[in-house]
Amino acid sequence: MIVRSVNVSLPKQVQHKNKTVSTGIFKQPVSGRVAVNQFNLAGDQQVDLVNHGGEHKAVYGFASGHYTFWQKKLGQAEIHYGQFGENLTIDGLDENLLCIGDQLQVGESVLEITQPRVPCFKLGLAFGREDMPHLFVENAATGIYFRVIETGSIASGNDVKLHQAHPTKLSVQRLFKAYFDNSLPETDKKAVMQQALEIDALSIEWREKLETRLG
């Protein structure tokens, strides 16, 4: 895996349904080395800290390979890196292989996988399509949220290597489908969700979601 692009954004004010909304989703690629702090990247800022950011969602990674799918799906010839709101666009990032609790060495930093992404309406703002969050969930290629284990710096071209695999081996995509895919057997979905709750690295947000669902 290789970092293809590092993307950041400060908050911007946009109009949405007759309201002014502040959002940090409009990421743009930056050059040079970018410092990775405990809660974000230098030059990046989350706005809604209830649904974005915090310890378990400090860095968001998205696969560069997904861009080809979305260009065809949306009929858009040009979609720039960072348009999905990701901090790191990574060649070879695979939600079906990487697991909750896995730790990756990215540049000088070590990042731990905490959860899949669940999109909000702001993804629709980035693409000018209100149906974008629904399409994103339907595709199940969610990208990955990380907690920062070791701070450092990251630059485009850095290798991304598995630093430590979590023994549970519950993939990010398998967890996401267990929660959202109603075509799967309910007993199988519950078994996956219960397995996820045993992983200490799982984010608080997803732990609460799963506990409520299993209720």
Image: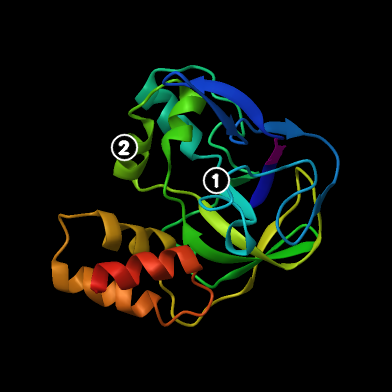
User: Mark 1 touching mark 2, by CB under 8 A?
Assistant: no
| Rendering coords of residue 32 (x, y %) | 86, 40
Q: Position of residue 97 (x, y in %)?
A: 45, 62
Residue that label 1 marks: 62
Residue 199 part of the magenta segment? no
7 falls in the magenta region: yes
Q: Label 2's element?
A: helix
Tell me if I can see residue 99 in this picture. no
- Numbered disc 1: secondary structure: strand
Residue 54 drawn above or below residue 165: above
x then y, percent, for residue 99 = 48, 68
Q: Over which residues does the magenta segment extend?
A: 5-9
Residues packed near mark 1 inside 10 Å, few (<14), some (14 to 19) or many (20 plus): many
Measured as percent of width and height from the top left, residue 155 is found at: 79, 46
The answer to which of 197 and 166 lies nearer the viewer is 197
- Picture disc at residue 36: none
